[in-house]
Image (tube, rainbow, N blue to C red):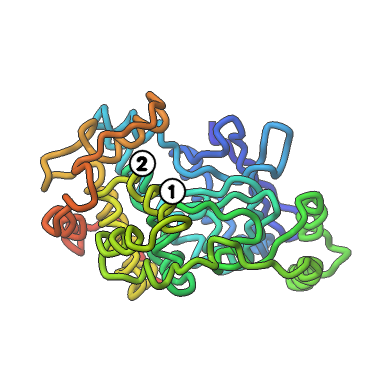
Amino acid sequence: MINIISTVTDGLGSITLDRPEALNALSPEMIEGLTEVLEKWRSDPSVDAVAIRGSNKKGPFGAFCAGGDIRFFHRASCAGDTALDDFFTAEYRLNHIICTYPKPYIAFMDGIVMGGGMGLSQGASLRIVTERTKMAMPETNIGLFPDVGAGIFLSRCPGASGEYLALTGQLLIGGDALAVGLADHIANSEDLDDHWRCLADPALGDIPQRLEYLQKQLTKRATITEPVWLQQPIDAVFALDSVTDITDRLAEMGAGWPAETLEILRQRSPLMLHVTLEQIRRGRHMNLEDDLRMERDLVQHCFYTRHLARSGISSETVEGIRALAIDKDHSPTWNPPTIAQVTPQMVAPFFNSPWSPAEHPLADLRA
């Protein structure tokens, strides 16, 4: 089952993610289906714009996408199934299609928007959240790193907030996403159906006129205030050179936000905290294509960590998924167990590509 619904009405190509029992987590079939639809619509003269939304068990909206199907990741990795490799190559290709799409692409990010859901939305020309939006890149909690182009969209957040979001997995609720540049407008969830319908309403004119009408409706929302967590000294801490420097500074700062943040970091994969910080710092100076190639290298090393003689069930990522989603004991055995025990020699090989430039699975990506 593909679990996506696509239709074309009066110039609008509409996509609804329809796997509500899994919070629309992306399966290989969904990645394939989305790619096929978007590639078809790219040159279809009857499609002038694309809009995407999620669904919950009661109908459209309510949930966008909780990310990739991590149960599939666990199952495929433990079995040595190369479908896992194909998944990430196809997903990152889809992310590239969205970010470089030649027609307006509007993402209605209502409800859960995490991981792969960010990959479906951050490249949109118009990103809409609601008061129900719960957005995050929490991958370090499962021994992974923020992927799907996060090296681009998190590194472009103001100051060091991208590093903070990448390392901690901080949850952004509603208008928080606007404050860090990860959304363009906030809408009332009760108005979403009207906003969605206006994009396919020929009575409002052509697609550019409908988009102009939608944006005018959205700007009527009240100004969003800065979230409390963003008022903390994030730049003074998360712009430091290393994860060790960051945690040492937090320890020096004492109770309150510093202590709470330090405790969060100590629960994450120490190895992947170091990898993630390097990823965000490198991504800040990359274009989209090189970033996606870097992330494809990184994810390969996450599941096949040959320089540490770990793969499959012994990998950091499979252990993290086991603890969160399989056994649900929330007690991963990280290796190394502490931030201080991670060495540069453990981190650097993650950034060495397993492929030559010509053989890279994303070698053909172009701006």
For the residue pair 344 and 244, the one nearer the viewer reads as 244
**Circle 1 crowding by C-alpha within 10 Å: few under 14, some 14–19, many from 20:** many
Secondary structure of residue under mark 1: loop
Residue 362 appearing in the image:
no
Q: Nearer the viewer, residue 265 or 285?
A: 265
Of 267 and 41, the residue lying toward us: 267
Q: What's the residue at 48%, 44% (across, down)? A: 67
Q: Tell me which amino acid carries mark 2.
A: Ile
**Residue 25 placement, left or right of 20:** left
The reply to whether discs 2 and 1 touch (Cβ–Cβ < 8 Å) is yes
Residue shown at 55%/64% (left/top)? 182
Q: Report the amino acid beneath label 1.
A: Pro
Q: Taking 72 as reference, is 190 above or below it? A: below
Residue 359, image quadrant: bottom left
Say which quadrant the C terminus sits in: bottom left
Disc count in the image? 2
Q: In the rendered image, which residue does mark 1 sit on?
A: 138
Farthest residue in the top direction? 327
Give how far across and how far down residue 41 sits, in percent.
59, 57
Question: Residue 127: percent from the left, percent from the top?
Answer: 62, 62
Q: Looking at the picture, how far across and down is residue 241, in whole percent?
A: 26, 70
Q: Is residue 344 left or right of residue 128?
A: left
Q: Return the residue found at the far right.
A: 203
Residue shown at the point (59%, 45%) measured from the top left: 112
Location of the N terminus by quadrant is top right
Mark 2: secondary structure: helix
Inter-mark Cα distance, 2 to 1: 8 Å
Q: List the residue tagged with mark 2.
A: 142
Query: Percent from the top left, x then y, of residue 310?
Result: 16, 38
Residue 115 shows in this picture = yes
Which residue is drawn at the image coordinates 58% and 62% (left, top)?
228
Q: Quadrant of residue 143?
A: top left
